[in-house]
């Protein structure tokens, strides 16, 4: 029997040691000699496992460390360090033909050992990487995996976390199998209708057949085809009267493929497929499925309260649900590759995603990381745009232009169906800069350069890739510098940016601007600007680090949502006779405020808000908002 068509999830049973573990005994010369041979790298070290603790994956060890004033402010005042993971697992007595060990993400430079052999090294915390381990594993016996993680150096200026923070698995396959790295499924619209096109990479399968079946959202077969295969096989399946994918209707088809030797199925491959078409037009901005579509985006780092960077699928779903309720339709992965789970969630829930590359370089290592990003992303209908960089110093000069051009070509070699941009915060008007060779002009802040950038390149669409970070502390309505907190009225923002109101006005008045991404979705560890210790979190999230919305979340929703709503603030727990600033955030036209049933007057809604000065008295504060014939109320 062959161990095949089986994914072994390596979730539980890991041991972890923070720092450099002690050895049970000192090595002599022969042990040093043995440690340099195949299989001897860990045996000679003889770790004392009694001091290792058990953990489950995903795991972020940094979130468990104490906060210290001596720590790095960008990292939430946490120290950086090294750590080891160690796992023993049993395999059945079956022949192993192909086995691929896949890490979705390890934060820190990492070295992977399989049964004492160095199987892989990886130099970024954000890319998925894998290695073939079939030759190292033992059938019917205990096997060992160890991972050394060095997180002393950083890739970003935000809280990154440390450790095996994304899933790990071993994929067992027969020698003839689908190669997931070469499988690319996409939709295309032709004059006579829509097709699902699958490029299927297969290995060791000469003379085999591929059977492809396309099912609709109810599981009904709507197209099928069987073809003989070459090294890379294209299968084209027509779809009559398709339901198109969009954030408002994230309809998914399922492609199921079988690799057959005569009538025997030797391997399978499946993918969810969303049929959709995206175009970019300087007169309309973004065009989705033939209609103009405004990008109502948000930027997000990936860490979350309690778990740090080790965000589970359930927490990811919660975060996306929080954002969608506010009318957000696009998510920017700031500033690195997302997880596979996040993209799957955004496919199903209907959230456009701009994925972002971490390093701006054409070195062999960085291009390998870029390849991994594109291969991860290209099968997901939610992914609508690739970003090559974020705020790079070389973006404004000729060498930045050359790097961007080569990286774009690398992207298009793997996926020519999506546009490529960068998040540029300067140099847009220089004679030679990175935006010259990109499909879209992505601009962080710098809104005063929109018109000049458009005049310089009138055929290109502009997208606000990062905008209007607004200071706020959840539940606080009076700023206090000593306490390092901000009022949540939405009128304090970073001095390098425009306000939310100015940003939205700039976007709405320009057809060549496709929309914007606001900074940011959630408070995150690190970057406590403008304060320092003891502040350890950012202040710019529209929600706190646990996902509970601040009042500023509803101010953004007033710009993003179409359905009429009203959010009344602040709370109604003050001292009798105290003068309170009362505000409603709404997308209505006018608002009438009531205190204990008594009208305090009607105000016109200007830039999504109306305000009153009210002397506090105990009771009920409420507001009624009108928009045409529509009415909505909210009360405290």
Image (cartoon, helix red, strand yellow):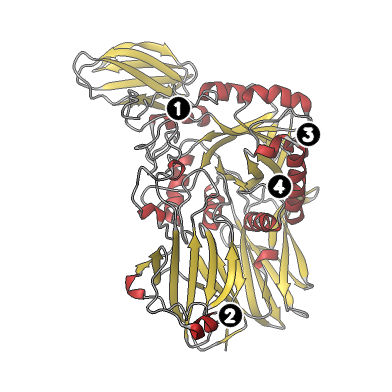
Residue under label 1, please give it: 555
Callouts 1 and 2 close, C-beta under 8 Å: no
Using the image, determine if residue 275 lies above or below residue 181. Answer: above
Pinpoint residue 57: horizontal percent, then vertical percent.
Answer: 43, 64
Nearest the camera: 45 or 288?
Answer: 45
Disc 1 or disc 3, which is closer to the eye?
Answer: 3
Query: Where's the N terminus, which quadrant?
Result: bottom right
Per the rendering, the mark at residue 4 is 2
Q: Residue at x 59, y 54 (%)?
A: 252
Pinpoint residue 155: horizontal percent, then vertical percent.
Answer: 55, 49
Residue 497 placement, left or right of 546: right
Which element type, helix, strand or loop, lies under badge 4? loop
Examine the image and state in which quarter residue 33 appears: bottom right
Q: Residue at x 51, y 89 (%)?
A: 93
Mark 4 or mark 1, which is nearer the start of the sequence? 4
Examine the image and state in which quarter residue 132 appears: bottom right
Callouts 3 and 4 close, C-beta under 8 Å: no
In whole angstroms, how far apart are the C-alphas of marks 1 and 4? 32 Å
Using the image, determine if residue 285 lies above or below residue 613. Answer: below
In whole angstroms, how far apart are the C-alphas of marks 1 and 3? 38 Å
Residue under label 3, please give it: 432
Query: Where's the C terminus, which quadrant?
Result: top left
In whole angstroms, how far apart are the C-alphas of marks 3 and 4? 24 Å
Nearest the camera: 59 or 374?
Answer: 59
Disc 2 or disc 3, which is closer to the eye?
Answer: 3
Residue under label 4, please give it: 418
């Amino acid at each position: 029997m062959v161990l095949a068509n089986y994914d072994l999830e390596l979730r539980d049973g890991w041991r972890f040691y923070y720092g450099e573990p002690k050895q049970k005994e000192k090595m002599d010369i022969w042990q040093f000699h043995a440690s340099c041979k195949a299989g001897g790298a860990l045996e000679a070290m003889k770790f004392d496992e009694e001091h290792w603790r058990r953990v489950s994956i995903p795991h972020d060890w940094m979130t468990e460390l104490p906060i210290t004033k001596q720590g790095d402010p960008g990292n939430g005042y946490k120290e950086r360090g090294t750590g080891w993971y160690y796992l023993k697992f049993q395999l059945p007595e079956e022949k192993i033909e192909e086995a691929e060990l896949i890490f979705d993400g390890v934060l820190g430079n990492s070295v992977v050992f399989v049964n004492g052999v160095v199987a892989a090294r990886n130099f970024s915390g954000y890319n998925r990487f894998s290695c073939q381990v079939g030759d190292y594993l033992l059938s019917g016996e205990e096997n060992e995996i160890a991972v050394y993680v060095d997180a002393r150096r950083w890739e970003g200026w935000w809280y990154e976390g440390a450790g095996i923070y994304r899933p790990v698995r071993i994929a067992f396959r027969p020698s003839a199998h689908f190669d997931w790295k070469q499988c690319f499924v996409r939709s295309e619209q032709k004059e006579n209708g829509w097709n699902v096109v699958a490029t299927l990479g297969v290995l060791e399968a000469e003379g085999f057949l591929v059977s492809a079946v396309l099912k609709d959202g109810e599981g009904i077969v709507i197209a099928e085809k069987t073809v003989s295969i070459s090294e890379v096989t294209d299968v084209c399946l027509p779809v009559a009267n398709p339901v198109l994918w969009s954030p408002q209707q994230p309809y998914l088809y399922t492609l199921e493929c079988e690799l057959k030797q005569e009538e025997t199925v030797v391997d399978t491959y499946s993918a969810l497929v969303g049929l959709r078409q995206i175009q970019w037009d300087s007169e309309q901005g973004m065009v989705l499925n033939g209609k103009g579509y405004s990008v109502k985006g948000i930027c997000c780092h990936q860490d979350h309260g309690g778990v740090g960077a080790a965000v589970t699928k359930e927490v990811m779903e919660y975060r996306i649900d929080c954002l969608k309720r506010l009318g957000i339709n696009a998510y920017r992965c700031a500033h690195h590759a997302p997880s596979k789970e996040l993209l799957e969630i955004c496919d199903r829930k209907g959230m456009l995603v701009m994925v972002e590359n971490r390093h701006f370089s054409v070195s062999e290592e960085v291009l390998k990381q870029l390849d991994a990003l594109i291969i991860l992303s290209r099968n997901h209908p939610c992914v609508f745009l690739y970003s090559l960089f974020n705020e790079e110093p070389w973006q404004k000069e000729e060498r930045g232009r050359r790097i961007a051009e080569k990286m774009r070509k690398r992207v298009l070699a793997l996926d020519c169906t999506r546009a490529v941009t960068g998040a540029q915060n300067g140099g847009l008007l220089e004679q030679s800069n990175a935006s010259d060779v990109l499909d879209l002009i992505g601009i962080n802040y710098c809104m005063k350069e929109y018109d000049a950038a458009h005049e310089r390149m009138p055929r290109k669409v502009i997208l606000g890739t990062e905008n209007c970070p607004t200071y706020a502390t959840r539940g606080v309505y009076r700023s206090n510098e000593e306490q390092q907190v901000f009022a949540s009225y939405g009128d304090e923002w970073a001095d390098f940016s425009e306000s939310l109101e100015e940003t939205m006005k700039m976007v709405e008045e320009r057809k060549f601007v496709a929309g914007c991404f606001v900074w940011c979705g959630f408070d995150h560890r690190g970057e406590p600007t403008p304060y320092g210790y003891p502040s350890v979190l950012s202040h710019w999230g529209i929600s706190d680090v646990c996902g509970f919305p601040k009042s500023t979340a509803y101010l953004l929703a007033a710009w993003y949502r179409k359905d009429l709503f009203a959010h009344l603030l602040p709370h109604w727990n003050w001292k009798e006779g105290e003068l309170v600033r009362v505000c409603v955030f709404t997308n209505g036209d006018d608002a009438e405020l009531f205190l204990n049933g008594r009208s305090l007057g009607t105000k016109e809604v200007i830039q999504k808000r109306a305000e009153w000065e009210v002397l506090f008295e105990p009771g009920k504060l409420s507001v009624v908002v009108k928009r045409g014939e529509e009415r909505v109320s909210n009360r405290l």
